[in-house]
Every structure is written in C-alpha cells, then in structure tokens.
Image (cartoon, coloured by chain):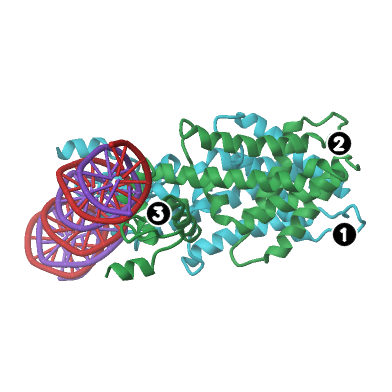
Chain colours: A cyan, B green, C red, D purple
Amino acid sequence: MADSRQKSRAGGLRKSGYHHGNLKEALVSAARVLILEKGPHGFSLIEAARLAGVSPAAPYRHFKDREALLAEVARRGYAKFSDSLETAWAGGEPDRLTAFRRLGHAYLDFALTERAYYAAMFEAELPPDGDPAFHDAADRAYRTLSTVTEGLKGDDPAGQSVPPEAVFFHIWSLAHGAATLGRSGGAPALSRHRMLDLGVEIYLKGLGVTS
Amino acid sequence: MADSRQKSRAGGLRKSGYHHGNLKEALVSAARVLILEKGPHGFSLIEAARLAGVSPAAPYRHFKDREALLAEVARRGYAKFSDSLETAWAGGEPDRLTAFRRLGHAYLDFALTERAYYAAMFEAELPPDGDPAFHDAADRAYRTLSTVTEGLKGDDPAGQSVPPEAVFFHIWSLAHGAATLGRSGGAPALSRHRMLDLGVEIYLKGLGVTS
DNA sequence: TGTACATCAGTGAACGCGCGTTCACTGATGTAC
DNA sequence: TGTACATCAGTGAACGCGCGTTCACTGATGTAC
C-alpha cells in the first residue's frame, strides 16, 4: 500500500518514504497537469497533492493556500514567457523587423506548447493585491512586449501617428487571438502561425512600417 | 417568513406564493447576475435558485441540469448578439465600409455592456455534443460575422490575395482583444472603442480596402 | 565515529461547507362535466 | 355557476461528494557534542 503510493508519485526525487524531498516542484508540476486538463478553475489543491503522492495537508508546508500555488504557477509561466520572448528578440538583431517576427512566433509557440502556463497567466484571475513576485514577473513580460512594439512607429490612415500603446494592444490582440480563438477542433497549430504572420504583415503594412 | 422570500424574489411575475409563474426567466436573469459576478465557472444552480426565491430543486422543472441553464444563457447571448450585429450591419447600407464600422462598434458594445452573455458565450466551455439550439444560435452569429468580413477583399504585402477566413480571424482577434484584453483597472470603455477603430483602420489600410 | 536532540516536512483524521441532484410530497391552476 | 379532478410547478429534506483547511502527531534529517 505504501509502495503503491510511491509508484504513482509524480515528478521530483524521492529521498525517503516519508519525506518527499522535492514536493514543491512536484506540486507545481501536478498543478500544470491539472490546469491543462481542467483549466485554472477546475484545479484543486487536494488533487494536486494526490498526483504528487502526498496527503492533502502536505501542500500547506510549501504554499499558504490554493491561490498561492496557482500564483506560483502563473509566476513561473510569466518568467518562462519573458525568457522565451527575450531570447527570440535577441536585442533586435539582425534587424528590428526580423527580430520582431521571431518574437511573434515565440509568443504563439509558448501559448500553444505551454497551454497550462498560458491559462494560469491569463485565466486565473489572481487578485491585484496578491504575491508581489507574481506581479513582478508579469510586469517583466509586459515591459518586454511593449519595449519591442515601441520600435514599430507609423501613421494611421488619417496621417496621425499611432500611440505606442495602441500598436502594443493591436499586436497583442492578434497574437492572443491566434493562441486562443477559434472553434474547437478546427485548424491545426501550423495554420495558427500562418494566420498570425499574415495578420501582423497586413497590420504593419497598414502602419507603414517597412524596416 | 414566506413574505421575506417574496420580497427578495428577483425578476418575473409572481402568480402566487407557491407557483412562481415565471421561474425559467427568473433563473436565466439570476444566472446572468451570477455569471457577471463570478464568471461562468463560479456560477451555481443553487445560488441561482436562491436568487430567484425558490428551493434548490425547483430549477429542475425547467432545466435538465446546471449545464443546461448555462447553455440557455449562452444561447440567448448568441441570439441577442446576432440581432445586434445584423441590425448594425443593416444590409451593408449606405456602403459596405460604413456598415462594417458600425458592426465593429456593435460587437464591442455588446461585449462590454452584456458581459455576462459574452462570458457565457466564450468562457463557458460547453460540450460540442450539447444542446443543438445553442449550436444553431452560435452558428448564426459566426455566419453573420464571416459573411460581413468576406466583403473585405485585399492582398497581403506579398501581393497574394488574403483568404476570407484569415480576414475574419484577424478582425475577430482585434475585436475580442479590445473586449477582453488589458490589465485590470486600466483604460475606460471609451478608449477601447478608439483602440478597436484604430486597429481596424490600420488593418484595412494594410489590406488595401478603401471602399 | 557514535549518540542526543532540534528541526520541520510529512501524516491522517477531522471539520464545516456548498454543491448537484433525487425523492416523495403538496398545493395552485385550469378544464371537464 | 359549481364541483371533481388531472396536471404539474413548486417544496424541503436528504444523499453523497469533493473541497479547503486545521490539528495534534510522527518520523527522517542533519547538527552539536
């Protein structure tokens, strides 16, 4: 019986039958699995504990409450997201437009391959007065995206120059839409990339950005 | 005691102390209130019954289960949404582009003023094998939107003509983004309209649509 | 190297809660005569 | 117009469930001596 628990234990090293040894990591992994299956709303702390092979009380050694685990998942998601975006951007080399297109792909890749993180980040509805580490991580991602889009200057059809926040918002909408919109079962991931590329190219042409 | 229940009863006529007389409508109203407060995931059938002033078992006279009530809300949302869009489109008069801009505003107005419906439509995760009436209503809305966007023909920067589904998808992303994206507390509703207008104008210019 | 002990990550039982759903029932309505 | 009755929209108590969280506890770890 004790053995069967060990067998079904998910993630992380096991130091002994009693101490898990890596429970915090195992809980985060379990949460990601559950969020992927049922969304951030369907996720439960007890089920995460079960998946990690520990009792329902064990998570409280590592997280204040259910929301704290969710916030930790979202925080890591933002951190990984920022890493991906910054790597793709690569300082804007060899030129801003090429780097920007790489970043668009990185955004969509992350959203599609790390769906649990993406859902935790954008669906979890974490309170504004929550974990500051979470907010710092989120800020970093937003800063990266807005810094990059600020390089895209252009005019609207009336000849007015377009505010940087607007460009940020439009590009973000296209990327988020490519990541989440569409009726179930529809187009495969590849066509989402094509869709996003096309949308961004058309938008940039409309802005008058060519280099 | 019986009186206090009657006082707190929400929506609908009351025919007697025993029979509610309009319970189905009252439950739909209550569901909309709760969805607005807590989202489609936080909504509970018992709480809706309480809000309508009836016992927890009463809703089962009108809905098979919790999901059926949610589906009914989403169905009505789609129906009302389609009405708004078709009214705004008005057959494309006086010209297609003017009518299209009206439709964009109607989309965003609906999403912002009928947030409960919009959430039920796009967040509720109703099963594909569910209520056919719900799917018919959803189809009608999608058909309207795609018919309208099919009128927007143009070329991508490489000179290839852009597939109609892509245009549909891009415009939809911009509208959905304007409706849902953005960090809490940020810009007021007015600037969301401005943001959407601007995005659509830039996109249409990129497409080469001018009339 | 060996032992006593402080630390603290785990246990498992228990709690109160709100939920979805079922059940036998009750009483208001409206129709047939 | 008055009465018997079928209908069916409600009641309210009960069920089993999974949840978040707390509690006194236990046992593995690693450190001081």
Label 3 chain ID: B
Label 2 chain ID: B
- Location of residue A4 in the rendering, given as x and y in whole percent from the top left corner: 19, 35
Q: Is residue A131 left or right of residue B136?
A: left
Q: In this view, does C20 lie to the left or right of A2?
A: right
- Graded by Cα atoms within 10 Å as few (under 14), some (14 to 19) or many (20 or more), the crowding at tag 1 reads few
Residue at 50% from the left image edge and 64% from the top image edge: A133
In depth, the one of B192 and C9 nearer the eye is: B192
Badges 2 and 3: C-beta atoms under 8 Å apart? no
Q: In this figure, which residue is indicated by the disc labeled 3? A: B21
Residue at 89% from the left image edge and 40% from the top image edge: B208
Q: On the same chain: label 2 and label 3?
A: yes
Within the image, what quadrant is residue B97 found in?
top right
The circle on residue B157 is 2
Q: In this figure, which residue is indicated by the disc labeled 1? A: A161
Find the distance from the CA under tag 1 to the CA under tag 3: 58 Å
Q: What element carries label 3?
A: loop
Instruction: Give the amino acid type for the residue marked by disc 2 in the picture.
Output: Pro
Find the distance from the CA under tag 2 to the CA under tag 3: 61 Å
Q: Is residue B181 above or below residue B127?
A: below
Q: Is residue B15 above or below residue A116?
A: below
Badges 1 and 3: C-beta atoms under 8 Å apart? no
- Location of residue B188 in the rendering, given as x and y in whole percent from the top left corner: 67, 66
